[in-house]
Image (cartoon, rainbow, N blue to C red):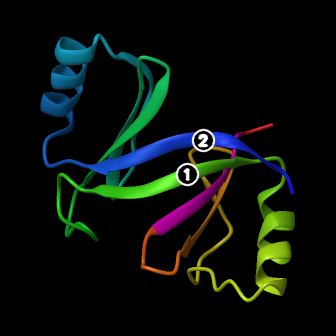
Amino acid sequence: MAIKGLAHIGVMVTDLPRSVAFYQKTFAAQVLEQYDKPHVAIALLDVAGVPIELLQFKNAAPRPAGVVDHVSLLADDVRAEVTRLQSLGVTFEPDSPREVLDGCVAAFFSGPDGERIELFQPRQ
């Protein structure tokens, strides 16, 4: 198995600048990266060593704001992990794996209670 640890916890928000300011003021969070894509704005924060990904969808959000959207696990090779997990009967979302955030690779699937899990490979 090539899972290396927690990549981040993704949280849905309705106002990204407001949420970033809240985490900075409340927890002295540091902004690690920010992205403004056509469908979503993202801020990756370091909150006392815990990576938190804030996601503001520009159109209809896939899930309500204020909830954890996904737990993301670091992987050495997402495509190899997808193959391994598919052999165990795991079903991935249709567009998984895919390139995200300028060279990273991600794949999403659901756990037994519908919890959304992401395998995440940082850019090389």
Q: Nearer the viewer, residue 36 or 29?
A: 29
Question: In this rendering, would 52 be left or right of 97?
Answer: left
- Chief secondary structure of the magenta span? strand
Residue at the spot 68% in from the left edge and 69% down from the top edge = 97
Density class for disc 2 (Cα within 10 Å; few <14, some 14-19, many ≥20) is some
**Kind of residue sitting beneath label 1:** Ser
User: Where residue 121 sits in the image (x, y, percent)?
Assistant: 72, 47
Mark count: 2
Label 1 sits on residue? 72
Residue at the spot 18% in from the left edge and 32% down from the top edge = 19
Choose the circle earlier in sequence order: 2 or 1. 2
Question: In this rendering, would 13 be left or right of 34?
Answer: left
User: Where residue 21 sits in the image (x, y, percent)?
Assistant: 17, 21
* Residue sitting at the far front: 113
Density class for disc 1 (Cα within 10 Å; few <14, some 14-19, many ≥20) is many
Q: Which label belongs to residue 44?
A: none
User: Where residue 15 sits in the image (x, y, percent)?
Assistant: 13, 41
Depicted 80 relative to depicted 15: above or below: below
Question: In this rendering, would 45 be left or right of 22?
Answer: right
Q: Quadrant of the C terminus?
A: top right
**Kind of residue sitting beneath label 2:** Leu
Residue at the spot 68% in from the left edge and 41% down from the top edge = 5
Task: Check disc 2 and report its element: helix, strand or loop.
Answer: strand
- Give, as a single range, the part of the protein colored magenta: 116-122
Mark 1 and mark 2 in contact (Cβ < 8 Å)? yes
Depicted 92 relative to depicted 13: above or below: below
Q: Which label belongs to residue 6?
A: 2
Residue at the spot 23% in from the left edge and 66% down from the top edge = 61
